[in-house]
Image (spheres, rainbow, N blue to C red):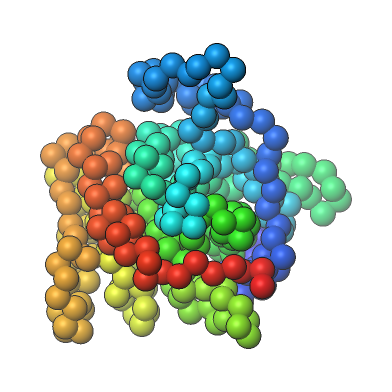
Amino acid sequence: MPNIHSSQTSIALVKERMDLVSGSSRLWIGFWTWVLVMATTTACFAQAPKKRPGEKEERPFQIVAIETKDGVRLRAAYFPSDKEKDAVPVLIVHEWGGQASPYLRLGLALKKAGCAVLIPELRGHGASNKYTTLSGGEEEFDLSKMGQADVALMLSRDLESCKGFLKEKNDAGELNLNALTLIGVKEGAALAAEWAIADWNFPSLGSKKQGQDVRAMIYVSPEELHKGVRLDKTFRDRFVWRLPTLIIAGKGSPEMGAANTVHDRLEKMRKKARMTDEEANKMFLANASLSGANLIQNDPAVTTEIVNFINSQVLTNILKFRWINRSE
C-alpha cells in the first residue's frame, strides 16, 4: 500500500502541486454509469420539462476519474456549471468510510445556484478502492488498516489531484478556481482544514498563481481530530481562520459540542482582529439530531443553509476573485 510519513505532508503537497501545473487528471469515459447511485436522486429530476424531439437532454453531473501521481484512480461526481468564469467551484470532502452518493442532491442544489461541484471518493473509499503496485499490478485498499500515512496521501495526492482537475476546468474557462469553497463532513472537516492551510501557505511560482484559492470553509458535523490531523490547527494558521466559515451540526448530535467550540473560538479570534461581519462566521444547529451525510440527506434546511452561505459570501463577491489562467 502507498506510504508516506505524516511529517512530510507539507513537502509532499508542494511537490504535488508543482507537478500538477501541467495537469495530471483526465476524464473517465462514460456518463450515468452510476445507476444505483442515481436511484437516490431520480426524484430530483423527474419533474424536469420535456425536451423537444432531437434536443439533447442535459445531464446534471458526470462520472469522472482523477488519476493521482501514485497510481490511484479516484472516482468522482462532477457537476459542471453554465456560469463559466463566474462559477464558484465547490469541493466536498466526505467522512471516513463515506462515498460520493449521499451528496448528489447537495451537488445538484449547488449547481442550480451557480456552482461547479466536485465530489471525489478518496482512496480506500467507494470506487476509489484500488491502487497500482510498484510491479505494475493492482491491489485493493483495506480501509481498516489505513492510518496517518494514508491520510497524508489523501491530502498530498488525492485532494491535490482534485485541485489539478479543477485547474484544468478553470483554464478551459468553465469555472473560477480563485473562488474555491471547501465543504468538509465529519472527519473530512479536519482534512479540508489541513488542506486549506497548505493551499493558503503555498507560494506562487514567479507570476504563476498556485495557491490561496480557498475563499470559504463549511464544516458539517466536524470531528476535531482524525488520525493525526487536527481541526484546531486552523487557529494557529495566519490565513484560514479569517475565511468566511459556516459550521453545521445537529442539535443533540455527538458533534454539537465540537461545532460550538470551533465556532466560539473563531468568533473570539475574529472579534480580536476587529472582523465585524457576523454572517462570515456562522453557526447553524439543525433540528435533527443526525450527523454528517445523514444530516445533509434528511434535513433540507442544511442544504438551504449551505447554498445561502456560499451565495452571500462567495457568489455575490465573485468579481473580487479575479479569474486567472493557471497555464500562462
Q: Is residue 171 visible?
A: yes
Residue 153 location, quadrant: bottom right
Residue 104 location, quadrant: top left
Q: Is residue 158 visible?
A: no
Q: Position of residue 269 (x, y in %)?
A: 20, 78
Q: Position of residue 327 (x, y in %)?
A: 66, 68
Residue 326 location, quadrant: bottom right
* Residue 186 relative to residue 132: left or right: left
The extreme top residue here reads 53
Q: Position of residue 137 (x, y in %)?
A: 82, 43
Query: Which residue is painted at 59% across and 68% down in the image?
Result: 325
Q: Is residue 118 above or below residue 298?
A: below
- Quick one: 11 or 60, which is closer to the camera? 60
Q: Is residue 120 above or below residue 288?
A: below
The extreme right residue here reads 135
Q: Position of residue 298 (x, y in %)?
A: 26, 31
Query: Which residue is painted at 47% across and 45% down in the image?
Result: 81
